[in-house]
Image: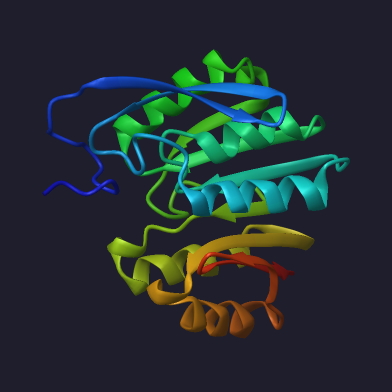
Amino acid sequence: MEQYFTKNPETKKEIYKFDWNIGTDRFYFYTSNSVFSKSGVDFGSMLLIETVVKENKNSNLKLLDMGCGYGPIGVIIAKLIENSNVTMADVNERALELAMMNANENKVENKVRILNSSAFENIKDKYDIIVTNPPIRAGKNVVFSFYEGAYEHLNDGGKLYVVIQKKQGAPSSKEKITSLFGNCEVADKKSGYFIFRAVK
């Protein structure tokens, strides 16, 4: 079976569309097969979005959504944090096409930049915040490379936010992030999902 972190998915492209409400804001997303969580924004991503928005609502920030998939995290944050500039990066070219469609659909295309990058391979800039719902099925080495890249690409005082389930390796992720940053707090946890926050 083709995984959502495949660079060029070969399954037949079938476009779906769903709408998603957050408070009084309504979002519309195009998805397809061979992308992560195609039928709706997954619980972990929603918890990540809520935490980042709550803690940074009035900030002026440059943010990277690493492993963005079809773009729900980056698009919603771009819309809800007024003074944000968002880069969305993924290795899956189908997902990136959808992310661009979704930025346009939700009228945040002027605040969003889409990049094809395997982990941090093509990332040159530094950011105030990096968020990720890491591709657990790609293996621990890939996931840990996200954390290492995040440390390198954050400004001093910048923050990494990670969502991960306890059963999918939250303890080892916390240990790895702490070894890099010297700190790693649980910003929120719910239904077996943890939001880790580390400050550079």
Q: Is residue 63 above or below residue 130?
A: above
Q: Based on the displayed image, in which of its 4 quarters is residue 12 positioned?
A: top left
Q: Is residue 187 left or right of residue 102?
A: right
Q: Is residue 126 above or below residue 116?
A: below
Residue depicted at 50% across the width and 69% down the height:
192
Residue 42 position in % (x across, y down)? 45, 46
Residue 41 position in % (x across, y down)? 47, 39
Q: Based on the displayed image, in which of its 4 quarters is residue 158 positioned?
A: bottom right
Residue depicted at 29% across the width and 62% down the height:
138
Residue depicted at 62% across the width and 33% down the height:
76
Residue 133 position in % (x across, y down)? 49, 55
Image quarter where the C terminus lies is bottom right
- Number of labelled discs? 0
Let me know if residue 127 appears in the view. Answer: no
Let me know if residue 29 appears in the view. Answer: yes
Between 45 and 160, the residue placed more toward the observer is: 45
Between 130 and 57, the residue placed more toward the observer is: 57
Residue 40 position in % (x across, y down)? 42, 36
Residue depicted at 45% across the width and 48% down the height:
67
- Which colour scheme appears in the figure? rainbow
Q: Is residue 55 left or right of residue 88?
A: right
Between 161 and 23, the residue placed more toward the observer is: 23
Q: Is residue 101 above or below residue 66?
A: above
Q: Is residue 28 above or below residue 45?
A: above
Q: Is residue 41 left or right of residue 184?
A: left
